[in-house]
Amino acid sequence: MPVEATKDSLRQRGVRLTRQRKILLDLIDGSGEHLDAEQLYQLAKEKDPKLNRVTVYRTLKLLKEGGLVDELDLMHQAGEQHYYETRRKQEHAHVICLSCGKVEEFFGEPLQRMRRQIEADFGFQIVLARTEVGGYCSHCQTMRAREMERAANSPAPVKPRPAA
């Protein structure tokens, strides 16, 4: 969603796109990462030292309610931590490593096909779709395989025999 569309979306809700709100939107959209509120606060503070934590939390809530930002739990890899991303991106799936927490984004026709099939099969009008896929990244698969190999090749511990 371009900045003008963002301004229009907020204006329709009677909300101004203040400098602080724009800083947060730019950080969320431009970071290339999924950031939590505290990370956003720390980055925003670098751009505007007067910005406080309460403003960041209120702004995130406002942007979420305004449909400009999605709040994600990313399979609860960090407990109850939530992450934010703008809705400017095309629909995508989050692919999350259950070991190291790495998050990748998958874009593509298979998601669109699934969406069309759900709409057709259920007579359902999809407004929002979120897809999360959990598994193990190639690095963690390699590490797990090495651990399993070491465990299989290490001698079993010798248990002492009880005295007779």
Image (cartoon, rainbow, N blue to C red):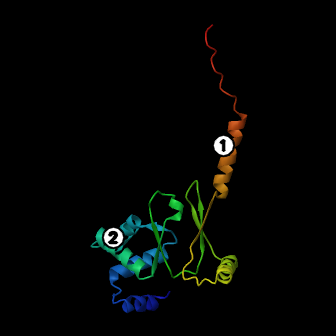
Residue at 39% of width from left, 88% of height from top?
10
Residue at 54% of width from left, 83% of height from top?
127
The C terminus sits in image quarter: top right
Tell me where residue 130 sits by quadrant: bottom right
Residue at 36% of width from left, 86% of height from top?
17
**25 with respect to 163 (left or right):** left
Of 101 and 67, nearer the camera is 67
**33 with respect to 109 (left or right):** left
Q: Is residue 52 visible?
A: no
**91 with respect to 25 (left or right):** right
Residue identifier under label 1: 147
Residue 122 drawn above or below residue 144: below
Cα distance, mark 1 to mark 2? 42 Å
Residue identifier under label 2: 45
Q: Mark 2: which amino acid? A: Lys
User: Badge 2 local density, few (<14 within 10 Å), some, or many (20+)?
Assistant: some
Q: Mark 1: which amino acid? A: Glu
Of 162 and 15, nearer the camera is 162
Q: Position of residue 47 (x, y in %)?
A: 35, 74
